Image: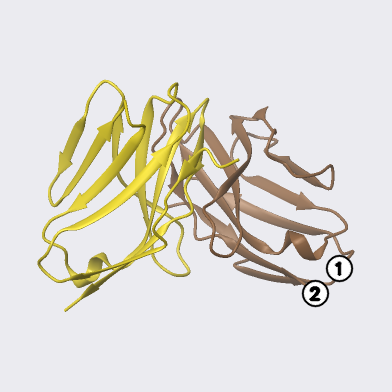
Chain colours: A brown, B yellow
Amino acid sequence: GAGVSQSPRYKVAKRGQDVALRCDPISGHVSLFWYQQALGQGPEFLTYFQNEAQLDKSGLPSDRFFAERPEGSVSTLKIQRTQQEDSAVYLCASSLVDDYEQYFGPGTRLTVT
Amino acid sequence: DQQVKQNSPSLSVQEGRISILNCDYTNSMFDYFLWYKKYPAEGPTFLISISSIKDKNEDGRFTVFLNKSAKHLSLHIVPSQPGDSAVYFCAVGNTGKLIFGQGTTLQVKP
């Protein structure tokens, strides 16, 4: 079956632009996670949905970051007024409810110039 | 302050020998631990996990050991194969989310 897909795979944005990153989870997976991975580091948690409910957004670094999952399936991570420090790989993962075994997408590499 | 640490950024091993990757964590309340493997330009892939009620879990060539008193986790790969060359992340499960270490790059030489 299809895994987690993310689009675009690569995004270059000028500083100050808004970007939107999309995640299509595995069909039937209730939980959806966003992580940010800086170069040479492990993924860091951003936010977590169970169906359409955003249960934890404690990892979002600022109010410029916003995530939604309106119908409990596809999710979008939006970053407003991008800054150079936002350059990273953004990973999406999904899982069955209450399962730590998360399935990751390939990530979106965001470069802010 | 990092809650999960992988102190070795890289490890090189000869094909057929054992690879041992290590991970330390700070919070004794953590109760679920995982290892992920990552190839370039791909997302992490789940490898093996262990809960705090066990001290060992085995899956083929991969074994994870948990030492709760030392707050230490290790992954053993025996025998190592060139296809195992990748970045390995340990992670702990905490209130739904995963907390990752910085990763260890394993190179298995033919």
In the picture of the structure, the residue carrying the numbered disc 2 is: A113
| Nearer to us in this view, B10 or B82 | B10
Residue located at (14% from left, 71% from top): B15
Marks 1 and 2 in Cβ contact (< 8 Å): yes
Residue located at (61% from left, 35% from top): A48
Question: Is residue A54 something one can see in this rendering?
Answer: no
**Label 1 chain ID:** A
* Tag 1 and tag 2 share a subunit: yes
Q: What residue type is labelled 2?
A: Thr
Q: Report how far apart the C-alphas of labels 1 and 2 lie in the structure.
A: 6 Å
Instruction: Choose top left, top right, bottom left or bottom right for residue A45.
Output: top right
How would you rate the neighbour count of disc 2 (Cα within 10 Å): few for under 14, some for 14-19, many for 20 or more?
few
Residue A82: image location, x then y, percent: 83, 60
Q: Which amino acid does label 1 sit on?
A: Arg
Residue A50: image location, x then y, percent: 58, 28
> Horizontally, is A29 left or right of A34 in the view?
left
Per the image, label 1 sits on a secondary structure element best described as loop
Relative to B24, say whether B71 is above or below.
above
Per the image, label 2 sits on a secondary structure element best described as loop
Residue located at (32% from left, 48% from top): B22
Residue A71: image location, x then y, percent: 65, 35
> Horizontally, is A112 left or right of A52 in the view?
right
Question: Is residue B21 something one can see in this rendering?
Answer: yes
**Label 2 chain ID:** A
> Horizontally, is A85 left or right of B22 in the view?
right
Q: In which quarter of the image is the C terminus of chain A?
A: bottom right
How would you rate the neighbour count of disc 1 (Cα within 10 Å): few for under 14, some for 14-19, many for 20 or more?
some
In the picture of the structure, the residue carrying the numbered disc 1 is: A15
Residue located at (83% from left, 62% from top): A83
For marks 1 and 2 on the same chain, the one whose residue lies earlier in the sequence: 1
| Nearer to us in this view, A12 or B88 | B88
Residue B84: image location, x then y, percent: 25, 65
